[in-house]
Amino acid sequence: MAAYALCVRDGRILLARSPGPGGVHEWVLPGGGMEHGEDPYDTVVREVAEETGYRIEVTGLLGVDSLRRVSRRRFRPAVDRHAVRILYAARITGGDLRYEVGGSTDLAAWQELAAVPGLTRVPLVDTGLRLWRERPATGRLAGAEE
């Protein structure tokens, strides 16, 4: 379980950069994993502060993204993983942009919305932007796996 924030203002989105597979850096939504017993709302507020230095106000629930993948490796048992990611709309209420030290990201920055398709990013960025634009009443995007 994880919670992420979409902070969009003045045609820009707040993203964090994370080292990806093979040392390639990928842009991600600020957010991350819930601690045991933590409410998802509290998770997103904490994670955004840790990764960007900003304090946020959650302004809405955009949706829930569920992803299941089975990883098969040679000579090892398959690993069945299920990720449930809660996406919130949020606005910045204070703090100063800074980079996370010793965490899962190494840079935070505002990116032009028009530039997002050209960024090396995780698919959740596109899912989040689509939820933000479409605002489906169910919190689920059309075409999501059943």
Image (tube, helix red, strand yellow):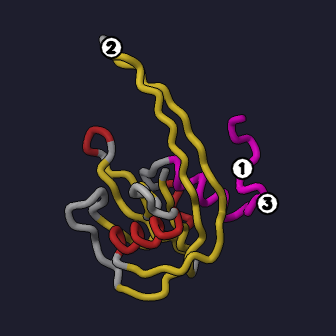
Badge 3 marks a residue whose secondary structure is: loop
User: Horizontal and vertical percent for residue 110?
Assistant: 44, 73
* Discs 3/1, front: 3
Image quadrant where residue 132 sits: bottom right
Image quadrant where residue 71 sits: top left
Magenta residues, start to end: 123-146
Residue, disc 1 = 141
Image quadrant where residue 105 sits: bottom left
Q: Which residue type does callout 3 highlight? A: Ala
Residue at the image point whose x is 48% and y is 26% from the top: 70
Q: Is residue 53 left or right of residue 68?
A: left
Farthest residue toward the top?
75
Residue at the image point whose x is 45% and y is 62% from the top: 38
Can the viewer see residue 112? no
Q: Quadrant of the C terminus?
A: top right
Q: Which residue type does callout 1 highlight? A: Leu
Residue, disc 2 = 74
Residue at the image point whose x is 58% and y is 60% from the top: 87
Q: Residues within 10 Å of mark 3 (few under 14, many from 20)?
A: few
Classify 77 as above or below 70: above
The dot on residue 137 is 3
